[in-house]
Amino acid sequence: TAHRRTEIEEMAPQVEAVSSRGAQLVSLRPLATLLRFTLRVKKRAAEIREAERLREEDEERRLGTNAIRVLEREAAAAEYAVAKRAAELAALVRTCERCGVEFMEDETNTPYVCRWHPGHKMVLQTWGSAYSCCRRTGNGCSIAKHSAPVPEIPTGPGQPPLP
């Protein structure tokens, strides 16, 4: 039995190393799955780009040099549409009248994004200044959605005002 115990003690580090390696392989399995998925997605994207390039070449051959001019006009029209949309979005950016932060009236304007003090700032003789609403400084003591007045849109003569 002493001989058998010695054999077991000699084999214990090897068994532990094998089981540790198995645990490492099991923990790497989700990473390998994610890597395979990523490679499939990249391969598919490359296939789509190649198909698009071949389709454009065929279209160019079919239409001749006029196709290049048509594509340039389409690209210019697309750039104009993007610039127009950017200008429209820039017009939607407003400044909160409470906290002074620029915001857009969308799903990011939640009831918890604007922090302000509804009171006025007071100068205290003992320790500087504080607000009359909470007697503190720093972040606001009131929380709500950002708020800004709706800008008036000028109307021409004889046109009813917009709601």
Image: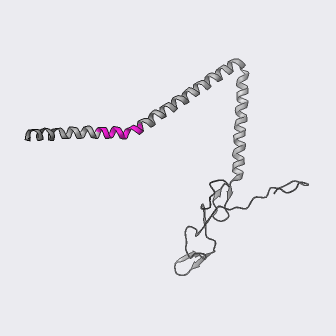
Residue 58 versus residue 137 in the image, above or below:
above
Q: Considering depth in this image, is 23 or 120 the residue closer to the camera? A: 23
Residue 46 sits above or below residue 26 on the image: above
| 95 sits left or right of 28 in the view | right
Residue for point 29% across, 38% down: 21
Quarter of the rendering occupied by the N terminus: top left
Left or right side of 113 for 40: left
Q: Which residues are magenta?
A: 21-31
The quarter holding residue 137 reads bottom right
The x, y position of residue 132, in whole percent, is: 61, 77
Q: Is residue 64 left or right of residue 13?
A: right
Residue in view at x 73 percent, y 22 percent: 66
Indicate the quadrant where residue 54 lies.
Answer: top right
Q: For the view shown, which residue lies furthest in the front direction?
A: 1
User: x, y percentage for residue 103?
Assistant: 65, 56
Assess whether residue 27 is covered by the magenta stretch: yes
Question: Looking at the image, is 65 positioned above or below residue 149?
Answer: above
Of the pair 114 and 60, the residue shown nearer to us: 114
Looking at this view, name the residue that lies furthest to the right.
Answer: 158
Q: Is residue 22 magenta?
A: yes
- SS assignment for the magenta stretch, majority: helix
Q: Which residue occupies 48% across, 34% down? A: 37
Please report the residue visible at 11 percent of the width from the left and 39 percent of the height from the top: 4
Query: At which x and y percent is residue 65?
Result: 71, 20
* Quadrant in which the C terminus appears: bottom right
Q: Toward the viewer: 122 or 103?
A: 103
Q: Give residue 153's quadrant in the image.
A: bottom right
| Side of 133 relative to 78 (left or right) | left
